[in-house]
Image (cartoon, rainbow, N blue to C red):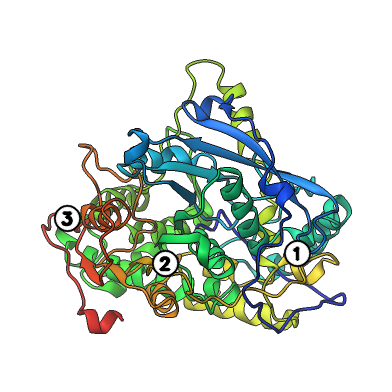
Amino acid sequence: MVTTGLALSLTGALPSVSFADDRQEPTEDRAPAAFHDQDVDWEECEDFFLTGLDCATVEVPLDYDAPEGERIHVGVSRRPAQVDEEERQGVLFTNPGGPGATGRLTADEIGSTPLGEVYDVIGMDPRGLGASTWLDCEVDPPLLDTHPTDEELEQHFDNQREYAKACDEADGDLRPHFTTANTARDMDVVRAVLGEEQIDYLGASYGTYLGAVYGTLFPERLDRAVLDSAVDPDGVWRENFLSQSQAATDNVERYTDWLAERDDEFGFGATREEVLRSFEQTSELLREEPREAESGMIYDEDYFRSLVSISADDQGSWDESALLFKALAEETPLPEAPEPPGEPDIPMPPEDPEEAEEQLGRLEGPPHLVWSLLCEAEWPTDPDRYRADVRELRDAHAFGQAASQAGPPVCLFSENQPTEPTVDLTREWETPALVIAGEFDSRTPYQGAADMADRLDSPLVSVVDNGGHVYYGASLTDDEGDQMYPCVADAVEAYLIDGQDPQDIDCHDRPRPGEDTPWSRSSSARR
């Protein structure tokens, strides 16, 4: 899942923390007709970054158990279908992941694919950020380095406690109601406001969980669902994060094996062990003297260790990242780091970049929703458990964000957190979902996505020999404008546009540099 620099943390004596053990059964609609029948004005979006989209604000209950009480709002965008009404296939709701990422931009990203020809593509900012009612702790969330020292880890305990206190004081009365289940209920209010009996859905990363929750709560309202880079339904949320460490190391190992086979070209060593030793030497070099690129990017030890893992994920640009690492190791002029695939190209206005940055900040909102969503799940309450996990992963996984992902959540120090149990995912809706998983995806590891497919009794698209994350979108094109994952695109569009029944398939997209077809393990080894 997209972690947005997530640093889970821990510390000292704990306040009284209540975690629900029971799982929530599917519920009927809790929103009164007044919410479904509200008048909504669609107007052209004002933000430069949403040019070409329609925007609206929809009111929803803060607490669906007390819908007559306080109201909040969610911001919604729409990219209308390009075909005549008789050819239009309804609405396609989208979510880009996070947890806690803004959704309105995604209507343009997905709407710019062939799906946007036949669907009204809907993007909704989840309650808590963007154009929706904000959660704002008024201080930045603390971050933990990828390989913290014991002293830094203990300091992070204190930082998390202070952050929790600030959040409780700023919006503690709101926070318990900002959950995945309530975001799904907000989606259904928007569906009703749009006058649609059913929706189709495309969600990525955390958005796959949101889509499955929506289908579980409103099975008669969901038709088709694409779950791209699905999370583990039984790992919400701690196990999902812990599983990332081994997945990242698996990627680093296949990358270093590839480099070892090309020692004559790159000079890191002729074995995996020699390449890893060279990377460790570069880490030590950057610890003593960080390097600055012409772009202003600073390469220090912490960033280098993360960058090795990030680069290992994308086997399509291993040659480009290897040249960067070679320059860092040999202290020669630095080339630019390759851009990770799939990042939407957000257009910038030609004038006033400071105003553009400020506008984009308002568009996205503060990054505080993530902790409310993570706190909806059960977490260990013993701080020593987190200390031990951080130290173990720090020592076992030299590259990647393993240790920073193993710390405790802010929930342990907050007095205000969700109390509603998480949703026990089931598929009662008729049409199987289409689940997509990368064989070496380090953010939503493969086995978890396979478990999601099994849980929903749905087929799985396996992207073979691939460590990418999120495989469908307008931004997923190469330098020539061709689809980076054409097999995945064909499967998604055949399912959503043509109505074909989804099937288990292997997609051999995005080969390694210099190879026409990627190496792959057998299907039985994967699933």
Whether residue 112 appears in this view of the structure is no
Is residue 418 left or right of 101 when viewed as pictured? right
Q: Residue 197, percent across and down?
A: 51, 53
Q: CA distance from mark 1 to mark 3?
A: 43 Å
Q: Earlier in the sequence, mark 1 or mark 3?
A: 1
Q: Secondary structure at mark 2?
A: loop
List x then y, in percent, for residue 511. 19, 58
Discs 2/3, front = 2
Q: Is residue 104 left or right of residue 513?
A: right
| Residue at (71% x, 84% y) in the render | 21
Res 263 visible: yes
Amino acid found under the numbered disc labelled 1: Gln
Residue bearing mark 2: 442
Helix, strand or loop at label 3? It is helix
Between discs 2 and 3, the one toward the N terminus: 3
Residue at image location 48% in from the left, 61% down from the top: 222
Q: Which mark is residue 265?
A: 3
Q: Are marks 1 and 2 in contact (CB under 8 Å)?
A: no
The image shows residue 271 at horizontal and vertical percentages of: 23, 73
Please, what is the three-letter code of the amino acid marked with disc 3? Glu
SS class, disc 1: helix
Q: Which mark is residue 168?
A: none
Q: Which mark is residue 155?
A: 1
Residue type for callout 2: Ser
* Mark 1 residue crowding within 10 angstroms, few (<14) / some (14–19) / many (20+): some
Give the spatial CA distance, label 1 vs label 2: 28 Å
Q: Nearer the viewer, residue 440 or 235?
A: 235
Q: Residue at x 42, y 32 (%)?
A: 294
